[in-house]
Image (cartoon, rainbow, N blue to C red):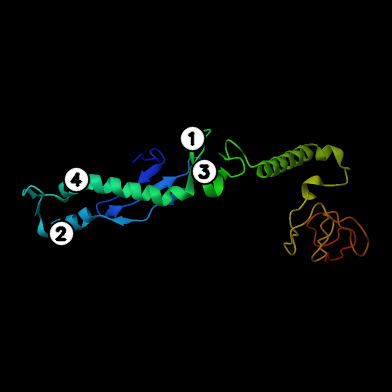
Amino acid sequence: MKIPFTDNYQDLSTDRGYQFKFLCERCGNGYLSSFKKSTTGAISGAARVFGSFFDGGGRIASTTEEAHRMTAGTAHDKAFEEAIEEIRPSFIQCPRCTKWVCKEKCWNEEKGLDKECAPDVGVEMAAAQAARTVEEIHAHAQVATEDLPSTVDWKSNRIKASCPKCGTPLPGNVKFCPNCGENLYMGKKCAKCKAELSPGAKFCLECGEKVT
């Protein structure tokens, strides 16, 4: 039998049994095979109790490690083959780069290639648009202090992602919260004398009116 997965698995087997972890060569996600109990593990357990046992040639084996070596080879290979058959439906090999990748996250079914060779167009476009938006925000932030009127404190008047009062996500650079009506513009005016209030002020500096 030709055995695939020769460089993308971890052998987690012990003297008690066999288990393997197969890894996607693109995202690194791991898939565990079912644990298969080892018969040599049972022998080793008995050996721990009685101290020694007879091997196939009538000789006494004095250690559990020696017992494991006598029969583990064939059993291990068989367990590995069974683990491959169990896990194979979750993987597919890309015909272009020959990587074994998980079908769930890294396979482009429409193109018949893994997503590294044939990226998901929709996902890539969304990621590119998001990156471009972030770049534009950073660029705008750098020149904002020069472009905005001197009466506006840009650092204290930056666009908010959510309402500071009720926590509702905001659709953009709005002046009032659509949920609770909170005034989001930092340059609020005194309700009594209409004087400009400084950010975070609790009382008006002109008339002493309490800010509500």
Give the residue number, with chain letter if any, for mark 3: 27
Nearest the viewer among 73 and 111 is: 111
Vertically, is 100 above or below 206?
Answer: above
108 left or right, relative to 91: right
Q: Real-space Cα distance between discs 4 and 2?
A: 16 Å
Nearest the viewer among 45 and 150 is: 45
Q: Real-space Cα distance between discs 2 and 1?
A: 45 Å
Label 4 secondary element: helix
Q: Quadrant of the C terminus?
A: bottom right
Query: In the rendered structure, which disc, 2 or 1, sits on the residue that comes first in sequence?
Result: 2
Q: Residue furthest top?
A: 96
73 left or right, relative to 128: left
Amino acid beneath label 2: Ala
Q: Position of residue 76 (x, y in %)?
A: 27, 47
Give the residue number, with chain letter if any, for mark 2: 46
Q: Is residue 189 visible?
A: yes
Q: Quadrant of the N terminus?
A: top left
Label 3 secondary element: loop
Q: Real-space Cα distance between discs 3 and 2?
A: 42 Å
Rendered image: mark on residue 69: 4
Amino acid beneath label 1: Thr
Q: Residue at x 22, y 55 (%)?
A: 39
Label 1 secondary element: loop
Nearest the viewer among 203 and 76 is: 76
Amino acid beneath label 3: Cys
Q: Residue furthest right?
A: 193
Q: Residue at x 51, y 33 (%)?
A: 97
Query: In the rendered structure, which disc, 3 or 1, sits on the residue that comes first in sequence?
Result: 3
- Depth-wise, is mark 3 or mark 4 nearer the camera? 4
Q: Position of residue 129 (x, y in %)?
A: 72, 42
